[in-house]
Image (spheres, coloured by chain):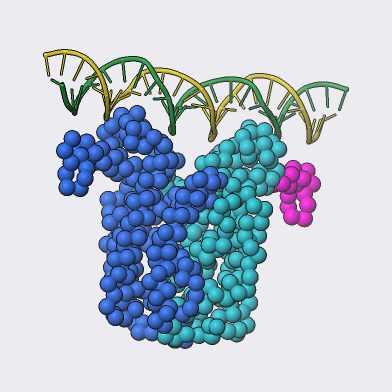
Chain colours: A cyan, B blue, C green, D yellow
Amino acid sequence: MNTTENGLSRRERERLTRQSAMLSAATELFAEKGYAGATLDEIALRAEFGKGTLYNYFPGGKKQILLAIFDQLYDGLCALIEDSFGTEENEPFRDTMEAFVSNCFQFFYEQFNLFMILVKEAEQLIFSDDQERVAYFVQQQNRVLQTLAGPLREAMNRGDIREMPPELLANMLFVNIKGYQMRRCPRNLTQSKKPLENPSKEQAGFLTDFILYGVSSDNAVEVT
Amino acid sequence: MNTTENGLSRRERERLTRQSAMLSAATELFAEKGYAGATLDEIALRAEFGKGTLYNYFPGGKKQILLAIFDQLYDGLCALIEDSFGTEENEPFRDTMEAFVSNCFQFFYEQFNLFMILVKEAEQLIFSDDQERVAYFVQQQNRVLQTLAGPLREAMNRGDIREMPPELLANMLFVNIKGYQMRRCPRNLTQSKKPLENPSKEQAGFLTDFILYGVSSDNAVEVT
DNA sequence: TCATATTCTGACTGACCGGTCACTTTATGG
DNA sequence: CCATAAAGTGACCGGTCAGTCAGAATATGA
């Protein structure tokens, strides 16, 4: 049983590859039809496995598949945050913020299926009455919020933004980014090939100004 | 067949009363378990009618019941907007805005079940592949957004807020109000009797400042 | 090559649920 | 009081689907 440099045997690597294929199929279908609307038969069919095989890889069944997808999503968001705020070398805070917003747009553009699943299923899960499910979600969501809250707290210390609970601000940032992103999705068709326009710098700039300076004209900034 | 001053016979009034009871039961159950999780048997049981009777009042079945609930929600929101922006007699715009935000909080507090249904089901419906359903939703949502866009456009003309597409701003307002409201819901239990704290003036003030002035400390306002 | 272990498979099952309809109950009004 | 109409009812039906499992296929390694 030889192992490669990453410490995985061929069997283990193949296993991961297959698991990943199943997750891809499930992600597509959940995004298209929603969690309740997609069936395990469809997922198995699209992944080119028998339905029973899904249970070798996800003994917890449909629920576990959904949670695995959300794991990917939250991992991606945390990485994105660290990437956006990681290497700021005294650049103006507005630029950092705009870069973060822009990266989020880009992420949701590239991972549009994950975005759809987030939009369609997250609240359903958060307010479910399955305690275990709720606990998982609160924990995952806090992980992301805390990751974002760190850089925000630093910005407050530097005086770039007003004092407020950083988790609250982190939450409001996501709310705004998600909400603005949703507006850009075509309402009628999920089938259209590229459902999101490629995110433009202009839109990231608008949202950044909205968040940093609000909509009042009292203290208008460099708005055109 | 005598009629009362509102033009409805006793039969018609009773019919409306019963329909309303069914909607109440359905609203509770959809809020608790979500649309997919609630069953017509439960709804009929809670409304104290036979299942078949539901179909006398809602020939379209489960879907029609959900749409009727959303009708109530959107009607309520439109009324709330008109109420909030209707009688402004040269009061400072920030006060008007705070009143609106506060009214929204109050509305969602009193109609918490409607808020839950909105949060859990709206996106599912908007991105459904049932064209008819989508069309209904786009139309209803636009009705609310347009109602709000009117006063916002006036505020722009008066110079109270920056120039931007009023529908966009209307959308961002709802996104922020909904997002802030969600934060105040207890994560773990939908069962707790009063799930939302009674909305406080302080919170409406915070969100109003957030929207009007943003979070930058460059042009900080009267923040404590 | 073959015995054994592992993995894959899809027909099957049992539970569930939206919707129907023949029948019962209630209301109407002559 | 009764004949007729209207409204209410819940057992039933057909379809769906998550999850199971006995057996097939494949991999392992002696």
Answer above or below: position of B200 versus A52: below
Q: Where is residue B83 in the image (x, y as percent from the top left)?
A: 29, 66
Q: Is A62 displayed left or right of C18 in the figure?
A: right
Within the magenta stretch, is there residue A10? yes
Residue plotted at (67% across, 33% down): A50
Q: Position of residue B128 (x, y in %)?
A: 53, 47
Please name whichever residue, D23 or A28, is drawn nearer the observer in this view of the structure: A28
Answer above or below: position of D28 versus A155: above
Answer above or below: position of A28 versus A74: above
**Quarter of the image holding residue A82?**
bottom right
Q: Is B9 displayed left or right of B85 in the figure?
A: left
Residue plotted at (42% across, 43% down): B35
Q: What number of labels is visible?
A: 0
Which region of the structure is painted magenta?
A1-17
Residue A135 appears in the rendering = no
Residue plotted at (63% across, 39% down): A43
Please name whichever residue, A7 or A74, is drawn nearer the observer in this view of the structure: A74
Q: Where is residue A54 in the image (x, y as percent from the top left)?
A: 63, 37
**Quarter of the image holding residue B222?**
bottom left
Q: Position of residue B129 (x, y in %)?
A: 56, 46
Please name whichever residue, D14 or B218, is drawn nearer the observer in this view of the structure: D14
Please name whichever residue, A32 or A60, is drawn nearer the observer in this view of the structure: A32
In which quadrant of the rendered image does the C terminus of chain A lie?
bottom right
Residue B84 appears in the rendering = yes
In which quadrant of the rendered image does the N terminus of chain A lie?
top right
Within the magenta stretch, is there residue A187? no
Q: Is A117 displayed left or right of A20 in the figure?
A: left
Residue plotted at (52% across, 65% down): A180
